[in-house]
Amino acid sequence: MSRSLEDALFGAPSPRARAVTRAASVAAAAVLLLLAAGIVLRFHSAGQLDARFWSFFVWPTTWTFLAKGLLGTVASAAMAAVIALALGLVLVLGRLARPRLLRWPSIAVIEFLRGTPTLLLIYVCFLVLPSVGIKLSTYWMLTLPISLSTAAVVAEVYRAGVLAVPRGQTDAARSLGLTEAQVFFLVVFPQALRYIVPALVAQLVIVVKDTTFGYVVTYGELMQNAKVLIANYHALVPVYLVVALLYCLVNYAISGASRRLGRPMH
């Protein structure tokens, strides 16, 4: 790579480049504001911003009902995340194992779960398993498929982090007489976590979004309760705007927690 190309890619931007970036940012912000204004005007002309569509939000029962849905979302997402993180670790250990008897089945499971839509797995738990005598609650009909689908992706995220750790770290640990398990859990994996925290956070956000499939099994999560409110009050836009804000707050909390957890690793 030539020096000029390296400077262009990785060097500090020139004053002209910074000016162009600021101008592009201002232009993009202006376009977004115009787009938002156009959407608001369309909603207003359609009557969706009328006070009668917002009045029920002053009732405590409305927020209690939404809070129950949010609690259901958090309960399902939290359990799915715990299972996915643990199962993903088991799968990546199998994929990185030297014996083919462990490696190939792990690869097959990972690729199968990665290639299968989460919604299809939910339908399997909802329709197929009861037909063979396996009955799950609506909570597990939603949580288990999300866990399995996410675990396969998390396993690949783990693997990317492990492969990013310099091989010299592994060789140095082995030279000290550590076993393979000690090398992985005491040396390699803690360093790998430093690289994969952003990717894991992205997957946790996806887990929260996947809980919106709860309508398939009529599980009482946030989106399902939102649809009940829409059916009762015919306030499509207000309800979805409030629910979108609640999802943003949950995902922001996840990102904030990940930043606090990531600080001691640096």
Image (cartoon, rainbow, N blue to C red):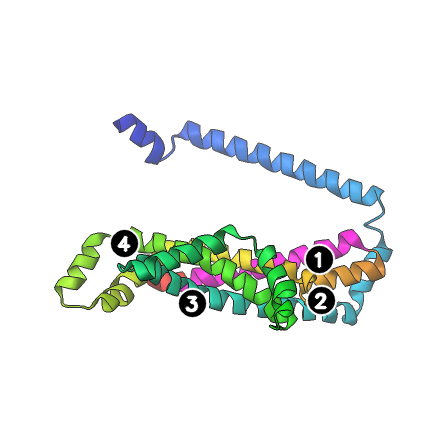
Q: Amino acid at mark 4?
A: Val
User: How far across and down, in percent of the image, does residue 128 sit?
Assistant: 62, 64
Q: Which residue is mark 2?
A: 66
Q: What residue is at 40 percent from the left and 54 percent from the top?
A: 156
The CA distance from mark 4 to mark 3 is: 21 Å
Q: Amino acid at mark 3?
A: Ala
Q: Amino acid at mark 1?
A: Val
For label 2, the crowd category at 10 Å Cα-Cα, with few meaning under 14, some 14 to 19 and many 20 or more, is: many
Q: Which residue is mark 3?
A: 86
For label 1, the crowd category at 10 Å Cα-Cα, with few meaning under 14, some 14 to 19 and many 20 or more, is: some
Q: Amino acid at mark 2?
A: Leu
Label 2 vs 4, first from the N-terminus: 2
User: How far across and down, in percent of the image, does residue 213 sit?
Assistant: 64, 59
Reply above or below: 132 against 38: below
Q: Magenta region: which residues?
A: 235-261
The reply to whether the C-beta atoms of the residues labelled 1 and 2 are less than 8 Å apart is: yes
Left or right position of 98 against 245: left
The CA distance from mark 3 to mark 1 is: 33 Å
The CA distance from mark 2 to mark 3 is: 30 Å
Report the mark closest to the observer, 4 or 3.
Answer: 3
Q: Which residue is mark 1?
A: 242
